[in-house]
Image: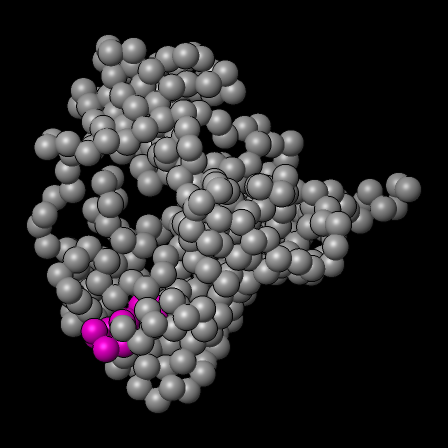
Amino acid sequence: MGGSGSRESGVNGELLQLVVEPADEGDRLDRYIAGKAPDLSRTYARYLIENARVLLNNRQARPSASVRAGDVVTVHLPEPQPAGLLAEPIPLQIVYEDDDVVVIDKPAGMVVHPAPGHERGTLVNALIARYPEMAISGDLRPGIVHRLDRDTSGLLVAARNDRALRSLQAQQQARRMLKIYLVVVEGRMHEAEGVIDAPIARHPTDRVRMAVVVGGRPARTHWRVLEELGEYTLLEARLETGRTHQIRVHCASRNRPVLADPIYGPKRPQATFGLTRQFLHAHRLGFALPSSGEWVEFTSPLPSDLEAALARLRQRASSALRRT
């Protein structure tokens, strides 16, 4: 998805300014904002518009207003509330827990930690309700070592005390933590396996996205083909580093975007196979337990929506093969 934009901080919060590109012409204003700022939900974008915190060409507009190429959209994001985290008894799928760590199988749609527009209903809100001692360092991300995008499902680990947090952070910084994803990309790979070694930073013109940028932070993704599905491919991707949107950015940089990716995929994909989010799942997670040093690994099967999409892909590939 194209677009240009910038973010600035101010005394009244953050200012996000976007310039509409031709590919986005005709989008509703609320949908456009949510698509350009993936940390904002469409509901929150609508709330900002209705509360006069969004200007379209320096004028107030309705959430349903259509944007045109060249339009300037200005979003005034309020400052995050400094109030303490709210504990919420949200059900979680706990894969493993001990006195130091907890491994969660996160569903798609759940935000990991509070942010503007997502102060409640996050994984952190659920964790501190279950483990009150996790209020580590008094920040908004207590115990969080690594995160998954809102619409990426699968495994992540959180620390229940400061010692465990330091241990997990050290393992991640030393690249000793195992993080393997299952991902379907558009197109076929030219080899059976490989490594994408390309630095990642904020996009130089579209500041709400990430991109492969010379001089960015080092990023390495190891991949191998698990199954060819006609014009699509099921991959296993192992992260050596953990940059924001790393797999999505790396795949898109090779012209192999993640299937149904609303940010880095094509504006209007040919097919999504019933998906409403990207086909990306944190499948395996491994690390050394902070107390004993014992190596542990956990596996999460594909959730039902990804499994159904994979079945449709296989059926389509099989039908195409029969026709040849």
**Residue 14, image x, y percentages:** 20, 33
Residue lying farthest to the bottom in this orientation = 292
**Residue 41, image x, y percentages:** 33, 37
Examine the rendered structure and indicate whether residue 60 appears above or below residue 310.
Answer: above
Q: Residue at x 57, y 32 (%)?
A: 266
Q: Residue at x 37, y 13 (%)?
A: 71
Viewport quadrant of the C terminus:
top right
**Residue 177, image x, y percentages:** 44, 71
Identify the image quadrant of residue 193: bottom right
* Front residue of this view, candidates 13 and 101: 13
**Residue 281, image x, y percentages:** 51, 57
Examine the rendered structure and indicate whether residue 174 appears above or below residue 99.
Answer: above
User: Can the viewer see residue 151?
Assistant: no
Q: Is residue 252 left or right of residue 76?
A: right
Q: Which residues are magenta?
A: 157-165
* Front residue of this view, candidates 222 and 278: 222
In reply to whether residue 80 is colored magenta, the answer given is no
Q: Residue at x 32, y 69 (%)?
A: 169
Examine the rendered structure and indicate whether residue 279 appears above or below residue 10.
Answer: below
* Front residue of this view, candidates 106 and 217: 217
Q: Residue at x 66, y 54 (%)?
A: 234
